[in-house]
Amino acid sequence: FFEYFEHGMQSIAQAEQLNDDSRKEFSYVFISNCAKAMGNVFVDRLPALVPVLLHVVEESELRKDEDDEDDEEYVPGDDSDDEDGMYVNIEDGFVNTRKAAVGALGALAEHCGQAYEPYLPQTFQVIMQEDKGAILSFHKNVRAEAVSTLPQICSVLCAKYNLQPPAKGVQIEMPQDMQGYVTAVMG
């Protein structure tokens, strides 16, 4: 089993080098599925995987239009052309890759438990960032994946404090840092 896993991990590295969105998407889905099946096996790989996934999720959805032919006709003081040459990237490969990266972060957080804690603040920021976080994506599939990832991210703190669901009607006091995350998620 681990022989195939290692081949899969090598394929992920190759997909990153080729900069092919389809291969990246499949790589991130592979990471999600392996994290679910193998759990703590990924703990040693977190330092290599998480920064790559965070970078993909952080990538701006806005692109500058390189083929802006109206520049020749620009007249200083003419406000009739207010377009700044920016557009939202709606390419399927880009959107699906970003969605898969968000899902992989959630799967790693949930299934690596407390070992994921060093990456928690940055992951939370990339998901929840006010201007460009995945939760506010222009693409509904990315937003939906980000919302489903939030409980997985909070599960890291549950693992840290060994919190279990309370019995029906019983309230428990959450640790201070967990209260901050849960309040931000609920907001």
Image (cartoon, helix red, strand yellow):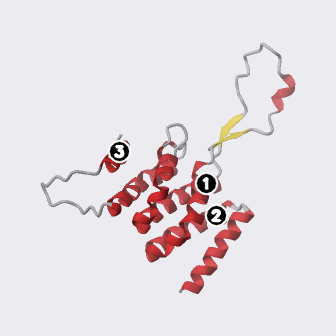
Q: Residue at x 19, y 53 (%)?
A: 172
Which is nearer the N-term, disc 2 or disc 3?
Answer: 2
Q: Give x and y (percent) for residue 125.
A: 49, 46
Q: Amino acid at mark 1?
A: Val
Q: Give the vertical position of 56 relative to 29 (above or below).
A: above
Which is nearer the N-term, disc 1 or disc 2?
Answer: 2
How many marks on residues?
3
Q: Amino acid at mark 2?
A: Lys
Q: Quadrant of residue 2?
A: bottom right
Q: Which label number is shown at residue 24?
A: 2
Q: Residue at x 73, y 64 (%)?
A: 17
Q: Amino acid at mark 3?
A: Gly
Q: Give the vertical position of 136 relative to 85 (above or below).
A: below
Most foreground residue, 92 or 34: 34
- SS at mark 3? helix
Q: CA distance from mark 1 to mark 2?
A: 10 Å
Q: Nearer the viewer, mark 3 or mark 1?
A: 3
Q: CA distance from mark 2 to mark 3?
A: 33 Å
Q: Nearer the viewer, mark 1 or mark 2?
A: 1
In the image, 24: left or right of 160? right
Tag 1 near tag 2, CB within 8 Å: yes
Q: Give the vertical position of 10 relative to 71 (above or below).
A: below
Q: Which label number is shown at residue 56?
A: 1
Q: Give x and y (percent) for residue 181.
A: 37, 47
